[in-house]
Amino acid sequence: MPNAATHDAITLVTGVAGTAIAWNLDLPDFGVVNASVLLGSYILSGLLFSPDLDLHSRPYTRWRWLRWIWLPYRRMAGHHRSWISHSLIWGPLIRILYFMCIMTLLSLGVLMLLGLLMPIDPTGSMEQFMYDVWVWISLHPSTVGYALAGFFLGSASHVIADALVTGFKRVF
């Protein structure tokens, strides 16, 4: 399996190359903004939301003082390279949903603490925020699609690199 520096290099090189290829494919709604979204989510997926978050790894330590939010995920994954972390579809999907749940809970906690200082409705504020996000998503479906494609492909580059190196080592 490649080391962290190799995974980072693979993420950066394949992300830039893939975006350049996508630019020449005449994809729908693929301009500068969506190309940036595709590349940004690809790199974010590879460097911060890596399948290696199930270990005490470079992506895990990049979260610095927020890395504690990934401890339940690490326990949930069970062991390194489990289907929870290293599958092509389930791995990134679980990380996205897990992160969204954690951020929702943290946001509710912060809003409840603010409610102690000033009159604020934590659930109403979250409900309004979720509605605003849903409206934005419905108005920009292609951008969301490119963000998800980048996120899933960034994770796939990691999983495929692991599989290729492991397969190569088994053969030789």
Image (cartoon, rainbow, N blue to C red):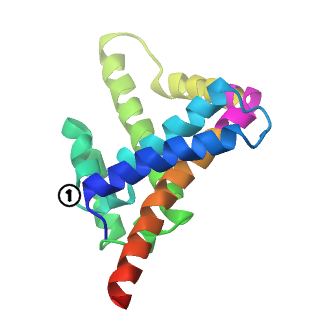
Magenta segment includes 134: no
x then y, percent, for residue 116: 31, 18
User: Which image quarter is the N terminus in?
Assistant: bottom left
x then y, percent, for residue 121: 48, 20
Range of the magenta residues? Answer: 136-144
**Amino acid type of the residue that numbered disc 1 sits on in the rendered structure:** His
x then y, percent, for residue 71: 26, 55
- Residue shown at the point (62%, 48%) measured from the top left: 149
Residue 99 visible to an observer of this rendering = no
Check disc 1: other Cα within 10 Å, few if <14, some if 14-19, many if 20+: few
Q: Nearer the viewer, residue 132 or 151?
A: 151
x then y, percent, for residue 101: 45, 45
Q: Nearer the viewer, residue 118 or 155?
A: 155
Residue reaching furthest to the bottom: 171
Element marked by disc 1: loop
- Residue shown at the point (66%, 37%) measured from the top left: 144
User: Which image quarter is the C terminus in?
Assistant: bottom left
Residue 167 vertical placement versus 75 (above, below): below
Q: Nearer the viewer, residue 142 or 108?
A: 142
